[in-house]
Image (spheres, grey):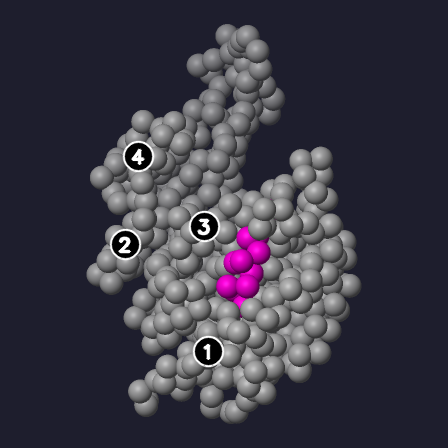
Amino acid sequence: MDTPQIPNLNDIFAYVDEHAQTFLARLIDYLRRPSISAYGEGIGEVAEYIAGVMRQMGLTVRIIPTSGWPMVFGEYNVQPGATTVLLYGHYDVQPPDPLEAWTSPPFEPTIRDGRLYARGVGDNKGQHFAQLMALETLLACRGTLPCNVKVLLEGEEEVGSPHMPEFISAHRDELQADLVIVSDGPVHENGQSTISLGVRGVLDVELRARGAKRDLHSGHWGGIVPNPLWTLVHLLASMKNERGDITIDGFYDNVQPLTELERQALAKLPIDVDEVKRTLDLQHLDEPQERDYFERLAGWPTLTINGIHGGYGGPGSKTVLPHEAVAKCDIRLVEAQTSEEILAKVKAHVQSHAPEVSVTSYGGMDPSKTPLDSPYTEPLRQAINAAQGTAPLLVPAKGASLPNYVFTKTLGIPAFGVPYANPDEANHAPNENMEVARFFIGIKTGAAMLSYLGARS
Ligand SMILES: [Zn+2]
């Protein structure tokens, strides 16, 4: 590889500044159009609309049906063999309810105090629209793109991406790229930009214990009939100890320890643990207490009891011996655990500790991690620095879950999260917003990333 040239982007950044108001007006037009995947409102129209925007820019675009809402896929090829970047986003949005909590209506985009308020502005229309305007800017200034680009916009992200895994498998060849960039979610809590390289996976597990066929009098039947709530309490206690270790047999077998590089990056992430404790009115963090804050999120799996139900929980007392008890749990997974492997281990554990308890799973998502020393990390870091004037923080893995494994595992390419939204974007909530300046910075960053990636090939 030749020494990469440092791209001169002055004309690009000037173009974005000159056209800022037009870009903003076009984003507002996009945001006026509801595309609510939960019940399908506007989905087909918005897929057509954004496909039209991409076509007008010169991309080859297809709307590809799935057994749910369609995918919008566009490409612009400059030259075979050049670096190929896949940009992923989603054109669907969350339902806007509760409507009365919005200061201005969710589909009437409004600017107040430098922020644009509208459902989907941060999550995710404002972010992938910034990527598209970056392509338009590069095409306007240079007549071509610095690398091959593919754009994939999903219509079901807000309902859990149920068709992404099969879609990615089925279109593996068309989607093949050297890397994928996902601009979704917020920057770091302190406002600094980030590159995130991983996400935890998640597995839902429901444990159901049955006793007698109906609720019974605890005096007449207590001591005779087993109590399913106790069965669950003992079972759950056998799955995690007081020190915070998950004690399901073989649970940690495939956990990949954090690398030295990852530890160094995690140590650089700003956090005020005392402030977190104050804000949440906590006496201490979860066990083990000595573990570092970001290491907990990036490097460790969890077992969370989301709820445990059975018997009577109303006012006063009721001396009942319940006939059934249910515990809902989620397990956050880290590289290289898989949801399939962990579900099998949970089932084996339940089989040996409480075989009468049934285990049901509503599904899982594998974790994903791109190595910090990927050859694309440095050009992306430099590009963000060039566009924003400060270098981004590197986040080896985030605590929450996204289906990024479809890129890193199914497609086998590195995945980089480069979010543009402000930390208080209020996504999924009333008054969702994006700082207008962040939208413009997003366009510049998108153009810079493609330019730096193009320069290294
Ligand atoms: Zn969302």
Q: How crowded is mark 4: few (under 14 residues within 10 Å), some or many (20 or more)?
A: few
Q: Identity of the amino acid at label 2?
A: Lys
Residue pointed to by mark 1: 9
Q: Give the range drawn in magenta.
A: 432-443
Q: Identity of the amino acid at label 3?
A: Ala
Task: Name which of mark 2 and mark 1 comes first in the sequence.
Answer: 1
Question: Could you give the CA–CA distance between mark 1 and mark 3, rounded to whole angstroms?
Answer: 34 Å
Q: Callout 3: helix, strand or loop? A: loop
Q: From what the image shows, is residue 374 above or below residue 222? A: below
Task: Name which of mark 1 and mark 4 comes first in the sequence.
Answer: 1
Residue pointed to by mark 4: 274
Residue pointed to by mark 3: 400
Q: Is the magenta stretch mostly helix, strand or loop?
A: helix
Q: Callout 1: helix, strand or loop? A: loop
Callouts 1 and 4 close, C-beta under 8 Å: no
Residue pointed to by mark 2: 268
Task: Name which of mark 1 and mark 3 comes first in the sequence.
Answer: 1
Question: Could you give the CA–CA distance between mark 2 and mark 3, rounded to whole angstroms?
Answer: 20 Å
Question: Could you give the CA–CA distance between mark 1 and mark 4, rounded to whole angstroms?
Answer: 42 Å
Q: Where is residue 280 in the image (x, y as percent from the top left)?
A: 41, 31
